[in-house]
Amino acid sequence: MTMDATEQARLVRDGEVSPAELVDEAIERLERLNPQLNAVIHPLLDEARDAAAGELPDGPFRGVPFLVKDLSCYMKGVPVHEGMRAVRDAGYVADHDMVIAERLRKAGFVILGRTNVPELGILPTTEPVAYGPTHNPWDLERSPGGSSGGSAAAVAAGIVAAAHANDGGGSIRIPASHCGLVGLKPSRARVSLAPDFGDVMAGLVIELAVTRSVRDAAAILDAIQGPVPGDPYAAPPPDRPYVEEVGADPGRLRIGVMTTPPGGQFETHPECVEAARNAAAALEELGHHVEESHPAEMDVPELITNFIVRWTTAQDWNLKYWGIAIGRELGPDDVEPCTWALAEQGRSHTGGDLLRAIEEAQGASRRIAAWWAEDGFDLLLTPTCAEPPPRLGEFDAPPEHPLAPLLRAIPFGTFTAGFNTTGQPAISLPLHVTADGLPVGVQLVAAFGREDVLVRIATQLEEARPWAGRFAPVHADAA
């Protein structure tokens, strides 16, 4: 399948194809390719066929096949295991829909199943012990990224044109980079987590999708964004639908470029530097002003320390949450070594430590935001990751070093995680391919609430440096 979701929806509206035909074709692709990829772990094929044959909502994506990540986005009567053996073995099934699931269905999407994730979404690779590794369609020996790796692999292989994803430190953008896709992380609280959560991990987590096109990302955001009564806070509403920003003139923007990881703790891979430099050149050709600059606060080591306090505390919360859900306390034998080590570290923090970390993050966010608000920049350009897609197995944890996977993860989240702290919108675009044929993404970051700017500039780059005709070797339409 080479058409994006917007084009598939047009075919349905114009009567050129039926939802049932689209779904049957997607199921055939899933059954043919998933054995190589291990991207979909909870197929819902009969349910999808029934939905496609019935009365679908008249939404913007009526009849378009879709996949949902097995992390958040609970659906009544459907398993949700979040990569955990204990939850899988308990046979846990959600007893309600989250609002995001309701909104995806209202948009007309037909959900084919749930996709593989690392345990609790912790790592930027998708290799859970519970379900085994997901393989990158660009190179089956490499990781598709994480934690939305199953969704990204399925989209990159052409099983579906778009799939649900979420992001607490880069989990939309990293898989998008590794799999040659568009990955838009919205502003904090743009998409409600109701009714289950207010602000997961003190506001680090946000929901959307991985897609083939910018217009799909914009239209899906239109379909699922907006607060629900009782949400603790909300992002400022957009001036107009995001789909109206597609192709709109962004004007002449001032763009800062950063290719050295925050703090300069290691070297960015040359291919990732080249990706960002080529994107900067393309932006200059489009008439934008580009210069070496980034918020100085991003180089402060305390920003990483602060993130780790909240991240590890969240893993302790996660184990408590799922222990309550399955009716027993979770112990070290129930989870992967890295998960348990992180939760133990989280338990070492006091409530005061957590509140202090949140306060420090809010202060740092204000100082970082000043680079956009006071220094006059519109966008920050970086590589999405500091390395190309790694090989599967590189995140294994030796018994004597359970936190080794987290250390291996640093180069992949170094450019992304800070903007979960600040809550700013960011997008990864598939603008580069390495000499050995691996995709490498480029990240653009806008001021809080300015997804409109990202959609406009991303559309410009999509037209100037098109990627629509670039496909993974493992793809539904490969010869």
Image (spheres, rainbow, N blue to C red):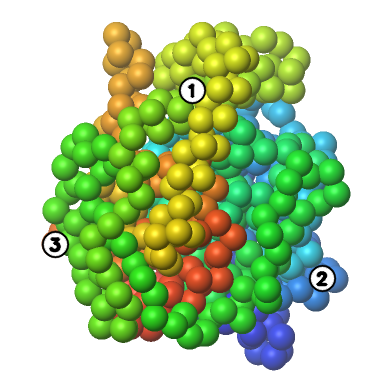
Please determine whether, in this image, residue 240 is positioned above or below residue 135.
below
Residue 28, position as x, y percentages in the image:
54, 64
Single out the mark in the foreground, 2 or 1. Answer: 1
Residue 384 placement (x, y as % from top left): 34, 53
- Relative to residue 86, is residue 51 drawn left or right? right
Q: Residues within 10 Å of mark 1 (few under 14, many from 20)?
A: many
Residue denoted by label 2? 57
Q: Which mark is residue 435?
A: 3
**Do callouts 2 and 1 mark residues in contact (Cβ within 8 Å)?**
no
Report helix, strand or loop for mark 1: helix
Res. 103 image quadrant: bottom right
Q: Amino acid at mark 2?
A: Pro
Q: Residues within 10 Å of mark 3 (few under 14, many from 20)?
A: few
- Where residue 367 appears, as percent x and y from the top left, is 45, 45
Give the spatial CA distance, label 2 vs label 1: 43 Å
Q: Residue furthest front?
A: 374
Residue 61 shows in this picture: yes
Marked residue nearer the N-terminal end (3 or 2): 2
Q: Quadrant of residue 93?
A: top right
Task: Decide which of 200, 96 is in the foreground and name it.
Answer: 200
- Per the image, label 3 sits on a secondary structure element best described as loop
